[in-house]
Amino acid sequence: MRITATIIAENEERRIVRAIESLRCCDEIVVLDSGSVDRTVELAAKLGARVVDSPWRGYAGQKNFAAEQASHDWILSIDADEALSEALEGEIWSLKKRGPDCDAYTMPRLAQYLGKWILHSGWYPDRKIRLYDRRKATWKGDFVHESVEVSGRVGHLEANLLHFTCDSLSEHLKTMDRYTTLAAQELVAQKRKIQWPRLIADPAWTFFRTYVIDRGFLDGIEGLTIAYMAAMYSFLKYAKARNMS
């Protein structure tokens, strides 16, 4: 079982080193860069990654293209703001030694938000398929929330993929603006009619679900912030979709 790790990147000099250095269990690392103007390409190449330059084709399209560049059929796809925990790296080493018994594997993702690890708020365990045989799986999703679709058996790893999200509220707001625009474009493409009551009801429900049902209150002030920002995300997504229609 030989594995190629793939990372899509654009201006990720702050995070690319951490991501690459966590991939010692992989036999090859491919960084698909979309026109970085910082030191992303330089740092990735210095760490032994093979850097491929490619224009942006959407999240799913970019990740599928990155998989096509791999020398091996088994793909470990992570984002530049993610890294394998030592335990997950060890678990993948063990899987390589005994050989795979599935066509893809999920792993729990543990997020760090404003410097704190988030264990509730609907953010954990947040299982994602990230290790897969490209002959049996492909990325799907035209706008946001891309995911791996598998035609075969899916297994489960137990150690955490670490997700280093926003270090500041300013960074979160900037990211939210980009993603809510993509989410709104998806709604418009689906010809979804957005009624104005949804702009009131959905954000309120999102806050309640995140903070109360998903026990965001156990994550302290960060949990309250996550719930509020989730509600704002919901409002902006629908408001932008109405404005685009």
Image (cartoon, rainbow, N blue to C red):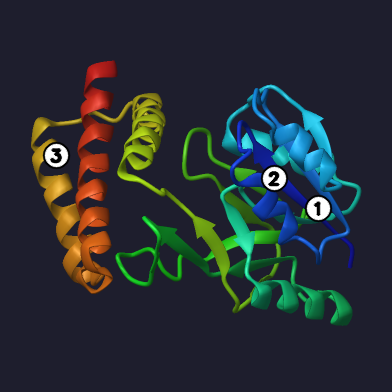
**Residue 107 placement: quadrant:** bottom right
Residue 61: x, y in percent? 65, 34
Q: CA distance from mark 3 to mark 1?
A: 41 Å
Label disc, if present, on residue 165 of the rendered structure: none
Q: Please report the residue visible at 81 percent of the width from the left and 32 percent of the height from the top.
A: 52
| Residue under label 3 | 198
In this rendering, position of residue 21 left or right of residue 162: right
First of labels 3, 1 by sequence position: 1
Residue 244: x, y in percent? 29, 17
Describe the element under mark 3 as helix, strand or loop.
helix
- Amino acid type of disc 2? Ile
Report if the CB atoms under discs 3 and 1 are less than 8 Å apart: no
Indicate whether 226 appears above or below 7: below
| Residue under label 2 | 7
Describe the element under mark 1 as helix, strand or loop.
loop
- Amino acid type of disc 3? Arg
Residue 127: x, y in percent? 51, 66
Asked if residue 35 shows in the view, the reply is: yes
Q: Please report the residue visible at 82 percent of the width from the left and 61 percent of the height from the top.
A: 26
- Amino acid type of disc 1? Arg
| Residue under label 1 | 135
- Mark 3 crowd level (few <14, some 14–19, many ≥20, 10 Å Cα): some
Viewer-proximal residue among 162 and 63: 162
Q: Point out the image quarter for the C terminus.
A: top left
Describe the element under mark 2 as helix, strand or loop.
strand
Camera-near label (3 vs 2) is 2
**Residue 116 placement: quadrant:** bottom left
Viewer-proximal residue among 214 and 238: 214
